[in-house]
Image (cartoon, rainbow, N blue to C red):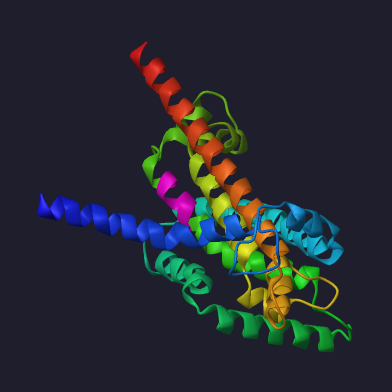
Amino acid sequence: MKKSAFSKIYIFLIFAFLYVPILIICVYSFNASNSTGVMTGLSVKWYAELFKDKVTLHACYNTIILAITSAVTATVLGTLAAIGIDKMKKGWRRSMLMTVTDIPMMNPEIVTGVSMMLLFVFIGAFLKINGVLGFWTLFIAHVTFSLPYVILNIMPKLKQIDPHLAEAAQDLGCTPAKAYWKVILPAIKPGIVSGFIMGFTLSLDDFIISYFVSGPKFQTLPIRIYSMTKKRVTPDMYALSTIIFVVILVMLIIINLSDLKGDSKKRKKGAE
């Protein structure tokens, strides 16, 4: 009984430590004054101020576009890479390739950011291009650090399926490409979706690498918020954080409900 009570208290403290700060932000986003420590009343004026801040809204737009494009690219490249690695014979070549793939994930972000910045600046100087840092450098950097996570989400799904499944599809008349499209990809779809969500999330909140490889013409939301901390973070940032939290929460609920419906349909088909 003591262990059970202790474990419940421990879990409660962990969840409180994780979610109480978010709840505080949500509450203070409705504060009537600009105070970040005193609640003077309820108001939605900071949400109105947020939608008047064109610079912040543009940074939010840039962040979403960058996250979607980089996550889609990393998912496509990661799926192809995972299928190729899975087809390789076990040995030193496969182990070396997996080690090289994991380097962007294991490497400290500040090292990755500085090294990429130096690379892009060197390429810009070599090609005599001014202002090389911008959307495309951010795009390449985000694809680079998202790619290992996509591969790691897809590889376990490839190991779970029957290795002769594609051959069976070809025996039934499918071409090799069609066999992968019709049989293998649907089987590893959960890994592809989770890899995309992981890449999107990593790109959405990345600051360290983005700080080094971004230019003055393309600003992401984390960099915009960091620039505001040099003076004072206004409560409209609380409103923006609340909106992002609610949107992500709704997305997670929808994804989990769809997974539950899919599992229930599979069980009904299995019972029939």
Q: Position of residue 216 (x, y in %)?
A: 83, 78
Q: Dividing the image into 4 quarters, which one contains the C terminus?
A: top left
Q: Vertically, is 86 above or below 123?
A: above
Count of marks, rendered view: 0
* Residue extending farthest left: 1
Is residue 79 in view?
A: no
Give the left or right position of residue 203, taking residue 91 as reference: right
Magenta run includes residue 156: yes
Magenta run includes residue 222: no
* Residue extending farthest top: 272
Magenta span: helix, strand or loop, mainly? Answer: helix
* Residue extending farthest front: 40
Give the left or right position of residue 117, taking residue 219 as reference: left
Is residue 104 in view?
A: yes
Residue at figure coordinates x 49%, y 37% from the top left: 256
Q: Vertically, is 173 above or below 92?
A: above
- Quadrant of residue 185 within the rendered picture: top right
Q: Position of residue 29 (x, y in %)?
A: 65, 58
Q: Vertically, is 31 above or below 220?
A: above
Give the left or right position of residue 149, taking residue 135 as reference: left
Q: Looking at this view, is 213 or 48 the one in front?
A: 48
Residue at figure coordinates x 45%, y 21% from the top left: 265
Q: Looking at this view, is 172 or 184 the one in front?
A: 184
Q: Looking at this view, is 117 or 233 the one in front?
A: 233
Residue range (magenta): 152-158
Residue at figure coordinates x 66%, y 58% from the top left: 31
Q: Position of residue 202 (x, y in %)?
A: 58, 62
Residue at figure coordinates x 58%, y 68% from the top left: 145
Q: Position of residue 195 (x, y in %)?
A: 54, 51
